[in-house]
Amino acid sequence: MRIVIDTNIWIRILLRGRITLPILEAWLANRFRLVTSAELLQEYNRVWQRPRLRKNIDPNQAATLYRQMQVRAHIVDLKTIPPQCRDPRIIQSWLPPLMAWQ
């Protein structure tokens, strides 16, 4: 199974959200394949470093998670952005794998 995870979910994981920790555990146990893009990885890296978040996030854990995503995730190349989408980076990340299944 392939899954795209929004940056907000990763941030909740870093903040030790009880509801989101099982997502991290499932990914680390290889129960799904993470699909992302360079743009989403950059967004994650920017967001966790915001001052209001950084005071509650362990920078070592955030950096380790970032490296894990770089190594273990299927990173897709974003070519076009759907014109009417609240979060086009999310849509772009799942479009190529979805097209590959057809």
Image (cartoon, helix red, strand yellow):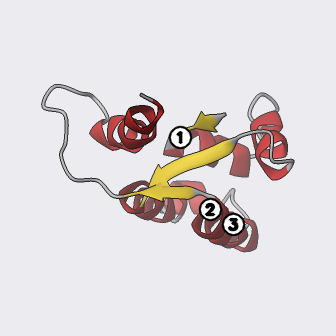
**Label 1 neighbour load within 10 Å: few <14, some 14-19, many 20+:** few
Left or right for 37, reference 87: right
Per the image, the residue denoted by label 3 is 68
The three-letter amino acid code for the residue at tag 2 is Met
The three-letter amino acid code for the residue at tag 3 is Gln
From the image, state whether disc 3 or disc 1 is nearer to you.
3
The numbered mark at residue 22 is none
Q: Which corner quadrant holds the N terminus?
A: top right
What residue is drawn where x is 84% and y is 44%? 25
Left or right for 73, reference 45: right
Per the image, the residue denoted by label 1 is 8
Q: Are marks 3 and 1 in contact (CB under 8 Å)?
A: no
Q: In this view, does 67 lie above or below 38?
A: below
Q: Is residue 76 above or below residue 62?
A: above
What residue is drawn where x is 82% and y is 52%? 28
Per the image, the residue denoted by label 2 is 69
Label 3, label 1: how far apart the Cα atoms are: 17 Å
Q: Is residue 85 above or below residue 16?
A: above
Left or right for 75, reference 59: left
Residue 97 location (% of width, % of height): 45, 40
